[in-house]
Structure formats: C-alpha cells, structure tokens
Image (tube, rainbow, N blue to C red):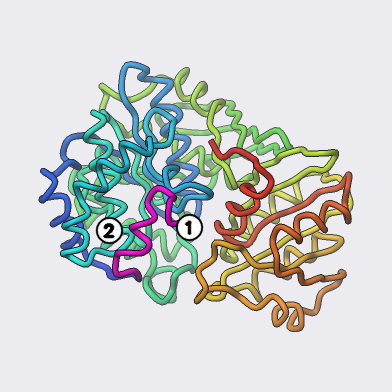
C-alpha cells in the first residue's frame, strides 16, 4: 500500500498482528459514541463463502428497500482500502474515511489497537455518520473473538467450516466450528450452511447454548445446478421460500450453496425488512462480487480471477472449472502466501492447466511471501512450470502462451487484487 492510499496509516501505525479479544474494539467504539448501536445488522461468518453471502444479501436489501441506506463491511480489499466499507453499493468516499480516521486515530494509537480492530471501528463509525439503516457485516477471522462480534445483529449465518488459520482457530473442523459459532446470540436466528456431521453438530450445540433459533440449509436445499461462464442456475428448496428456480451471475456450484444460505438469512430477518421473493430475484441477478470465479474477456483471451487461498477454496474453484468448457490452452498464474498450504493447493490446479507460471504478488507482506522457485522444484508437475517473480511480467507472458485461451489467476487476495490493478479492470 502506498503512503497516500486511503487507510495507509492503519497499516503503518497500528501494532499489527492478530490479538483476539473484544475489549479494544469496544473501547474504540465507546469513545466514538457507540456508532455500532445506531444501525441494524446481519452478521455473516464461515471459512469460505461469507463474502459472497454478504454481497448477495446486500444486493437484495438494496433492491428491496431503495428508501433505506444499506452498508456492507467486508475484508480484505482487492485494490483500494475503501472497498471494505460500502454504502448503497459504492465504496466509502476518501473524505468520509479521512474524517472518521481523524476522530478515531488518537484512541487507536493510545490503545495500540490492531489493524482489524481499528478498521472495524472505522467502518461502524462511517456507517453511523452516513445514517446507514441496515449493514451486512462479514466476520474477519473466526467469530467468537473477532472484532465484528460487538454488534447485536438481527440474524447471523455460518456458511461452512474448513481448515484455515489453524494457528489461531484450532486444527480440527470441530474446533474451528466452535469459534465460528461464537457469533450466535440469544433469540437471534442462526443460519447454518455446514453439512458435515462433526462441525454441524458443534454449530448446532453452539446455537442451542446461545438460545439462538436454528435454521439449517440441508444438503438437498440446492439441486439441478447448471454452471456456465455466464453464471449459475439451480433449484432452491426452502421451508420459507418454497421451490424456486434461481439464477445468479456468480459462477460455481458452491455459489449456489452460498445463495441458498443468503436466501435463508434474508428469510430470517424481521418482517419489516424481510424482502419479497421478487426482491431476492432482482438482488441476486444484480450481484457483483469481484475476484470469485470472475470472468473477463480481453484481447481474445478469457481471464478468470479467483481468490482461492486454501485447499477448500481451491476445491470449489476446480469444481467450477470442471463444469465449464474452457477455451484451451489454460495457463495458470499462481502466487500463494508462504503460510498457506500451497503444496496441497497447486496440484489440483496444475492438473487442469496446460502450462503454469508461479509468481509473487507485489502487495503480499514481505514476511509472508513464498519462494516460487522452491515451490517449482518441489512439485511433480505434469505440465511446464515457469517461475517469473514479477507479476506484471507473468501476466504478459501468460498472454503470449494463450492468446485465445484461458488465463487463470489465483492463489491469494493479494494476487487477484494486484492482477486486476495491473490489467486496469475495475473492482466496483
């Protein structure tokens, strides 16, 4: 991040790292007049898909309530920090962000708040100052002790549970489910998208212990899934919505599951803000969630951008790739962070490509940058693998390898965000 980018001071002046606990976030918000009490909210957690569910809900609520101001808080961003805080579908203005920063900065520095604690307080202050009526808030990491867990939502959801951030959340799906179920609140509907017995049982217990009414999205809630480069169609079976034919522009069978979770979360809202099915259809059709099986066509080539950064994300990505007839050849451009399981992530991707380029994302923190040369040496790749450390050069080389084929950019949020910036593809 450049020093003049919005939010740059958060990266340079906070203590950094991850320190669980809600005390600092609560203190920051108390000092600003508790802005998180001035809007109603939905709270969305899970290992994968929580951003897509949040985006789907936000799009529907804007379609259902044009008279209301709708906020969306997600993380991380792809290109600009302002993407994290959106109001009525648009990133927060630089001036509004600067005003909120000026108000919070003394307390951020006094408390030694972490980046995410400060960012969360900043988002809630921006929402309150803009008179947001409803906000969809995505959990950052875990749930129980995540900074966002200070809100009192109308409804919550956990999309799924997979192994990720094991150093913080535990090394079994059940341990991770216990942390994620920490967002469930007394009397607040808890939508559960997980279907695997172990973590599902944990989430059920967490909801029951919290006194949260459970809504489960069963495995058979989604059927007849049809995936193309234009989006996904499927049949939804819901106790509330009934049997519905659904179309979303998001690509992949996993996005059908995400849409089903979003539909049940919207159905769980209080009657005064619960959307009609017509609004659900309109909002689903209009949703845009960049970097998730995002397809762009440039100069004859088909580009696919996906932020898959763990084995579960790669499994969803490869399932989507397998369901589409892609223009050949397929060239993989991958940059993974050092602390991720790149040795498990890359083989399934290499098996579906005709050539690969391993590279480094420019915005990746220095201490988390992987060594693509080492990765290339370690892989028993069935295809040619090149190492080009410069992402810009890697993208240029990929175009020459597949001028009318498919170029798949993946491995991390940093990778996709940097690539979109280099190729000048807008994110909003």
* Residue 281 in view, yes or no: yes
Q: CA distance from mark 2 to mark 1?
A: 19 Å
Quadrant position of residue 263: top left
Mark 1 nearby-residue class (10 Å; few <14, some 14–19, many ≥20): some
Q: Residue at x 37, y 41 (%)?
A: 85
Q: Secondary structure at mark 2?
A: helix
Which one is nearer the viewer's eye here, 123 or 49?
123
Quadrant position of residue 105: bottom left
Residue 1: which disc?
1
Residue 203 at x, y percent in the picture: 34, 58
Q: Establish if 310 lies above or below 320.
A: below
Which one is nearer the viewer's eye here, 398 or 64?
398
In the rendered view, does 230 fall on the left or right side of 177? right
In the rendered view, does 228 fall on the left or right side of 149? right
Q: Nearer the viewer, mark 2 or mark 1?
A: 1
Q: Magenta stretch containing residue 8, yes or no?
A: yes
Mark 2 nearby-residue class (10 Å; few <14, some 14–19, many ≥20): many
Residue 418 at x, y percent in the picture: 60, 54
Circle 2 residue: 117
Q: Secondary structure at mark 1?
A: loop
Residue 298: which disc?
none
Quadrant position of residue 342: bottom right
Q: Magenta stretch containing residue 347, yes or no?
A: no
Q: Return the disc, 2 or 1, that comes first in the chain's sequence.
A: 1
Characterize the magenta stretch by its predominant secondary structure: loop
In the rendered view, does 297 fall on the left or right side of 193? right
Residue 403 at x, y percent in the picture: 88, 47
Magenta segment boundaries in residue numbering: 1-16
């Amino acid at each position: 991040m450049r020093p003049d980018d919005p939010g740059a001071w958060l990266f340079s002046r906070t203590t950094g790292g991850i320190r669980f606990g809600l005390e600092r976030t609560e203190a920051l918000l108390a000092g600003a007049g508790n802005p998180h009490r001035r809007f109603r909210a939905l709270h969305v957690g899970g290992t994968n898909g929580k951003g897509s569910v949040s985006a789907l809900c936000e799009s529907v609520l804007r379609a259902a309530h044009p008279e209301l101001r709708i906020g969306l808080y997600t993380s991380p961003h792809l290109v600009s920090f302002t993407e994290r805080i959106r109001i009525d579908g648009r990133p927060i203005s630089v001036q509004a962000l600067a005003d909120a920063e000026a108000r919070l900065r003394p307390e951020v520095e006094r408390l030694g708040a972490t980046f995410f604690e400060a960012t969360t307080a900043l988002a809630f202050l921006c929402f309150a100052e803009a008179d947001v009526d409803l906000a969809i808030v995505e959990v950052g990491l875990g749930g129980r002790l995540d900074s966002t867990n200070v809100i009192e939502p109308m409804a919550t959801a956990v999309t799924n549970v997979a192994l990720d951030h094991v150093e913080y959340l535990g090394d079994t799906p059940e341990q991770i489910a216990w942390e994620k179920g920490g967002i469930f609140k007394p009397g607040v509907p808890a939508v559960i998208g997980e279907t695997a017995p172990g973590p599902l049982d944990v989430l059920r217990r967490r909801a029951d212990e919290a006194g949260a009414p459970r809504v489960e999205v069963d495995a058979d809630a989604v059927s007849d899934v049809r995936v193309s480069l234009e989006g996904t169609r499927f049949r939804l079976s819901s106790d509330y919505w009934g049997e519905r034919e659904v179309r979303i522009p998001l690509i992949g069978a996993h996005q059908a599951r995400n849409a089903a979770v979003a539909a049940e979360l919207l159905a769980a809202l209080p009657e005064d803000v619960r959307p009609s099915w017509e609004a659900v259809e309109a909002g689903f059709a209009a949703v845009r969630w960049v970097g998730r099986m995002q397809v762009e066509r440039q100069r004859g080539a088909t580009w696919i951008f996906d932020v898959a950064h763990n084995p579960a994300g790669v499994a969803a990505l490869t399932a989507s790739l397998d369901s589409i007839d892609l223009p050949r050849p397929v060239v993989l451009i991958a940059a993974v962070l050092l602390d991720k399981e790149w040795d498990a992530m890359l083989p399934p991707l290499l098996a579906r490509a005709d050539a690969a380029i391993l590279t480094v994302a420019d915005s990746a923190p220095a201490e988390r940058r992987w060594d693509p040369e080492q990765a290339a040496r370690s892989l028993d790749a069935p295809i040619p693998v090149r190492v080009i450390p410069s992402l810009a050069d890697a993208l240029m080389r990929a175009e020459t390898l597949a001028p009318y084929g498919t170029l798949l950019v993946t491995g991390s949020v940093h990778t996709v965000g940097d690539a979109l910036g280099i190729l000048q593809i807008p994110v909003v």
